[in-house]
Amino acid sequence: MADQQGQRGAGPRESLGYEQARDELLQVVRQLETGGTTLEESLALWERGEELAKVCQRWLDGARARLDAAMAAEEPAGE
């Protein structure tokens, strides 16, 4: 996967790796929990967090599909 570090804040269809999206999501959550931001900043952080959560979920769904396919391929026919 291409390095996307320079695209922080890009749209929800960005191609961040799972770990990158998860780490940024953790930063967003920490900022929201810490407070001290304006309402507008908090909303922007929330929206970014939602986008990052969707990226993570797509990665996890894809990983599950690959595992399921690999397990199905290993099962003998007729079972």
Image: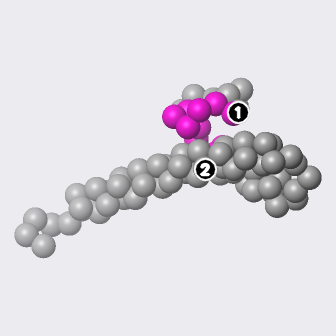
Asked whether, in this view, residue 12 is left or right of residue 6, the answer is left
Q: Amino acid at mark 2?
A: Glu
Q: Is residue 19 above or below residue 1?
A: below
Q: Quadrant of residue 9?
A: top right
Q: 30 or 37, which is in the foreground?
A: 37
Place of residue 61 in the rendered image (x, y in percent of width and height, measured from the top left): 42, 55
- Position of residue 71 relative to residue 15, above or below, is below
Which residue sits at x=15%, y=66%? 76
**Residue 24 seen by the camera:** no
For the point 12% across and 73% down, the residue is 79
Disc 1 designates what residue? 8
Label 1 neighbourhood size at 10 Å, few (<14), some (14-19), many (20+)?
A: few
Eyeballing the image, is 12 above or below 67? above
Would residue 10 be counted in the magenta stretch?
yes
The image quarter in which residue 35 lies? bottom right
- Magenta residues? 9-21
* In-image side of 8 versus 35 (left or right): left
Find disc 2 in the rendering and name its residue: 50
Q: Nearer the viewer, residue 67 or 17?
A: 17
Separation (CA) of disc 1 from disc 2:
14 Å
Instruction: Indicate the secondary structure of the residue bearing disc 1.
Output: loop
Q: Is residue 18 magenta?
A: yes
